[in-house]
Image: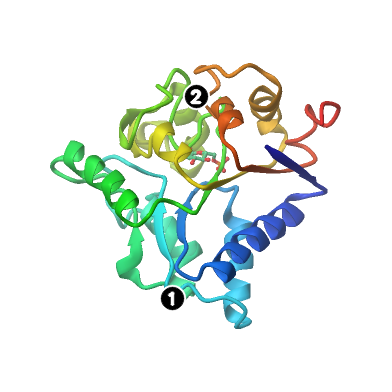
Amino acid sequence: MEIFICKDYDHASKLAANILASHILLKPDSILGLATGSTPVGMYKYLVEKFNAGELSFKEVKSFNLDEYVKLPKDDVNSYYTFMYENLFNHIDIDKENVNIPDGNVVDPIKFCDDYDKKIDECGGIDVQILGIGQNAHIGFNEPDSVFYEKTRVVDLAESTIKANSRFFNTLEEVPTQAISMGIGTIMKSKHIILMANGESKAEAIKNMIVGDIDPKVPASILKLHPRVTVIVDEEAGALVKDYI
Ligand code: GLP
């Protein structure tokens, strides 16, 4: 695990964008695993800047998103589908046929999830997976006590996650209680994982992930067993680990 404590969110976003861009430059048909949430917004902004400057093309890239809420219409302002198009896909040259986002409204979610994992495997696996982290150290929507080898599936959201994500909705009741999420087993198969976090509210989760034992109660702690993980945090999120690294 390599850990970068950046001076602020902007610096962290730039670093993550540079690493992701270097993957694409070295392998133009990279398979990207992409994340939503407020954390990667700055990174996406820098990727769009690189595209606009003619430094980067996504023409051959394929992408797979980590997760999506169940039963939220695709075009809802809070769907991860809307998020990805607004923050990235509408602004770059990715072929929309190459964009994969879990569909939270499918009739047969079990088949959909199996097919999602199969499609990732058939593409050769994810080259670089972006992750945020929840305050309870969830990754994707793999909440505490998730089974480490699980694949993509429908999950129930923890009360604390519903509360944390309610900041984007008008009321707590509007927050979906389920999601489709890549499993930790799916995530662990990625060749390179970049986990990003910023702000004081993530400091405890980052400490538990880096310093604590590998424990299903801290889903992100399993990343310690992955051969290539880059953790990029700002000073606030890294405040409780700076004495350990
Ligand atoms: C959500 C998403 C995660 C994300 C996390 C943190 O629950 N499913 O993929 O990493 O929240 O979100 P934020 O970056 O907004 O703090």
Considering every residue shown, the one lying at the far left of the view is: 107
Residue at 40% from the left image edge and 51% from the top image edge: 125
Residue at 52% from the left image edge and 46% from the top image edge: 37
Q: Amino acid at mark 1?
A: Lys
The answer to which of 166 and 53 lies nearer the viewer is 53
Q: Amino acid at mark 2?
A: Ser
Residue at 43% from the left image edge and 67% from the top image edge: 61
> Can you identify the residue that label 2 sits on?
160
Q: CA distance from mark 1 to mark 2?
A: 38 Å
Q: Residues within 10 Å of mark 2 (few under 14, many from 20)?
A: few
Considering every residue shown, the one lying at the far bottom of the view is: 54
Toward which corner of the image does residue 134 lie, by quadrant? top right
Residue at 78% from the left image edge and 28% from the top image edge: 241
Residue 139 visible at all: yes
Q: Position of residue 73 (x, y in %)?
A: 27, 50
**Drawn side of residue 71 relative to residue 137, left or right:** left
Badge 1 or badge 2: first in the primary sequence: 1
Toward which corner of the image does residue 152 lie, by quadrant? top left
**Drawn side of residue 206 relative to residue 64, left or right:** right
> Can you identify the residue that label 1 sits on?
59
Which-is-in-front pick, marks 1 and 2? 1
**For the C terminus, which image quadrant?**
top right
Secondary element under disc 1, as helix, strand or loop, is loop
**For the N terminus, which image quadrant?**
top right
